[in-house]
Amino acid sequence: MTRTEPNQPMGAAPAGLDHVGLYAHDMDAAAAMYQRLGFTLTPLSQHSGTHAVTREVVKAGIANRCAMLGHGYIELVAVVDPALDLRGIPEGLARYAGMHIVAFDTPDPGQRIAALHEAGFAAEPGVLQRYIDTADGPRLARFSQVRTPRQAMPEGLILTLRHETPELLWQARYMGHPNGARALAAAIVAVEDVDAAAARYARYLGVPAERRGGEAWFTLRSGRLALVDQAALAARLPGSAAPALPFPAALAVEVDDLSRTAAVLDDNQVAYRRAGGQLTVAARDAGGAAVIFCANAEAAFAGAPEEP
């Protein structure tokens, strides 16, 4: 095993893996698929955000439903009003339906921007807002984002954010899942050149990568990020094929009890593969990104190929 060290000290390294997001052609179909996997989803919530040109906060034509976990969450995103700002969703869907968003959290967006500039990245602030259903009626959830140009992080919409109103997102009524899901354990991203991508993410995240063969893993305060080459992807997800490179290929979810998760999948007639203390649902049955159920983040890391 080798380590790829960050080139620059980063005073505002992300505290953890905040969430992943999947783009869907049909929200109802994507939601039904995730409910079959045993997730409880939040109601539909339409976005508002910073306009790319005017920098004003305007209503967007996209909306989400989320599986809120004890740590992190999974976001399903779809177009709901084609006449409004679509935030690049159609362009993403033209490449593939599946995971496009990997988001990290930070306690201080301003410090994070300064740290990214120091590490050689262009970065700017952004605002995201959306109304969320609560027991007291709709309330406005607010997010402070740190954005880098897509060409600098070509793996997808890679961003850092701070939740300004976390109590609106993490509502107890949406956090109980039939499959026993309790945390977002990892995001796995297929890349063409693991060495180059690992060096870049070490600078972006401010933490070293652990190298094992064709994989590079970043351990955060909560959750992990893995960069894998095509051979490592095939070894982890037999039968999978990247529709494009780079490609966020899979997410791992920590669950209370794998036997409970398996029972839910069996009851809902969802096919899965059991191996190495993991239950893996193929991308075709999970909205375009494989879902790996595991006991913890370390179990998601298990089975990584060793260097020769």
Image (cartoon, grey):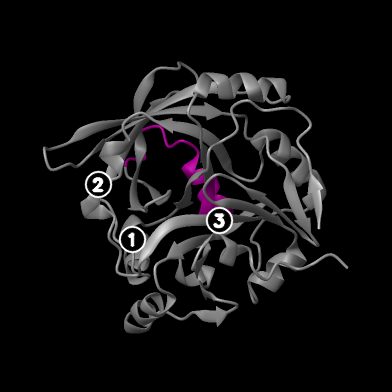
Q: Which mark is residue 186?
A: 3
x%, y% of residue 215?
74, 58
x%, y% of residue 171?
25, 46
Residue at the extreme left of the image, as rendered: 136
Which tag is nearer the camera, tag 3 or tag 1?
3
Q: CA distance from mark 2 to mark 1?
A: 19 Å
Amino acid residing under circle 2: Gln
- The span picked out in magenta is 81-101
Q: Which residue is found at the position 35% from the left and 70% from the top?
A: 179
Task: Give the quarter of the figure containing the N terminus.
Answer: bottom right
**In the image, is 159 to the left or to the right of 63?**
right
Q: Which quadrant would residue 138 be assigned to in this image?
A: top left
Q: Is residue 267 above or below residue 46?
A: below
x%, y% of residue 131?
25, 35
Q: CA distance from mark 3 to mark 1?
A: 21 Å
Residue where numbered disc 2 is placed: 171
Q: Is residue 286 magenta?
A: no
Q: Which mark is residue 31?
A: 1
The secondary element bearing badge 1 is classed as helix
Q: Is residue 250 above or below residue 53?
A: below
State whether residue 97 appears in this view: no
**In the image, is 97 to the left or to the right of 156?**
left
Q: Which quadrant would residue 85 be assigned to in this image?
A: top left
The secondary element bearing badge 2 is classed as loop
Query: Which class describes the residues within 10 Å of circle 1: few (<14), some (14-19), or many (20+)?
Result: many
Q: Is residue 143 above or below residue 240?
A: above
Q: CA distance from mark 3 to mark 2?
A: 22 Å
Q: Earlier in the sequence, mark 3 or mark 2?
A: 2
Amino acid residing under circle 1: Ala
Amino acid residing under circle 3: Ala
